[in-house]
Image (tube, rainbow, N blue to C red):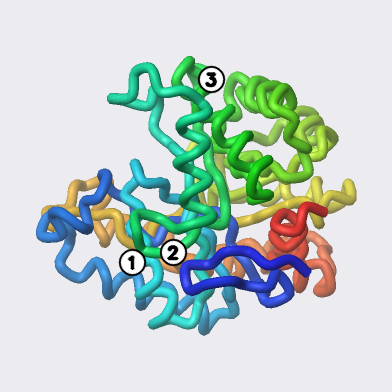
Amino acid sequence: MTIINSVLGPLDTKNLGVTLCHEHLQDSSTALTLNYPELLEPAYKKHIIDGLKKARAGGINTVVDASTMDLGRDVNLLAEASRASGVNVIAISGWALEKPRFFPGITAKRFAKAFIKDITVGIAGTGIKAGVLKEASDRAGVLPGEEIVLRAIARAHLETGVPIMVHTAMAGEIARQQIAILKQEGVKMGRVKIDHANDTTDLKYLTWILDQGCFLGLDRYPGSRITPEERTNCLKALIDMGYADRLCISHDWSLARFLSRPSPAGSPAKRKKINPYGFLYIKEKVFPQLREMGVSEKTLSTLLVNGPRNFFEGK
């Protein structure tokens, strides 16, 4: 039992229930919902609340919203959606976009102070506190500005005990660099989740990450580049190897990410065709496949429960 921050206040981990550890209620440019909501599809709030209500009716209890400030985080919107839907929502602190831009000379110590404030005081004067820390690096590796953020995340974690989620690129095995830096900062790997891990089927690399003590975020469903079936085959292999309680499975899906004039890639119609299930894709598509592969109902009943709870509790 551990008390963590949700957007509606303290939440006991025994009440997390079925949890999706990497989703987006919405993602956009920084503060778009606050400054230019007219650029968004008019019904974006309805998309979010309806999507969460559908998820709640399908058995989802908790969602971690993985949007940092620079991915459009709006904690008042998260709180409104949580309250309206009955789904626990956990906001995050940290930084996602590379460099970061416009902050030459800011040290890891100063960034850490800002992230700690998000966790202990609240975000942007709202009193709504973050429950996870996030850093992101991609195929280019850990760039100099990203290393500053990563070290700041580590220091904020050590100060607050809030766990860390890491956006990484499976191509190039970038998590090796990120894990090395976190270890230098004194972070225990049992408090770290390496995300987008099901963008590869390289079990040797994935088990190396797990054997460092990290959790795996298998959070790209249905995803692209490799098929959902390939992702599920890899998931089944990890379950068979005994890692089920260290897996955090979700979609990295956004309930609202389209502008009022949709692009072909982001139109509601195209997104609905890709994933008509929203936050229930795993339960509706992946679980039936796992049943056919011989995964027991007992394992399925805890697959979206134990890993996330262990991540938050540091087990």
Residue 244 x %, y %: 81, 55
> Which residue does the numbered mark 2 point to in the structure image?
128
Could you tell me the amino acid type at mark 1? Asn
Q: Residues within 10 Å of mark 1 (few under 14, many from 20)?
A: some
Separation of residues labelled 2 and 1 (CA atoms): 8 Å
> Of discs 1 and 3, which sits in the foreground?
1
Name the side, left or right, on which 244 lies relative to 253.
right
The image quarter in which residue 155 lies: top right
Q: Is residue 199 visible?
A: no
Is the residue under label 2 in contact with that under label 3 (CB below 8 Å)?
no
Q: Is residue 80 above or below residue 103?
A: below
* Disc 2 residue type (three-letter): Ile
The percent position of residue 109, horizontal first and vertical second, equals 52, 29
* Residue 246's disc number: none
Q: Quadrant of the N terminus?
A: bottom right
Secondary structure of residue under mark 3? loop
Q: Amino acid at mark 3?
A: Val
In what element is the residue under mark 1? helix
Earlier sequence position, callout 3 versus callout 2: 2
* Callout 3 crowding tier (Cα within 10 Å): few <14, some 14–19, many ≥20: many
- Cβ atoms under marks 2 and 1 closer than 8 Å: yes
- The residue that appears at 37% across and 61% down in the rendered structure is 75
Give the vertical position of 144 relative to 277 (above or below).
above
Q: Earlier in the sequence, mark 1 or mark 3?
A: 1
Reading the image, the residue beneath label 1 is 76
Q: Is residue 256 left or right of residue 96?
A: left
Identify the mark nearer the N-term, 2 or 1: 1
Q: Write down the residue under mark 3.
A: 142
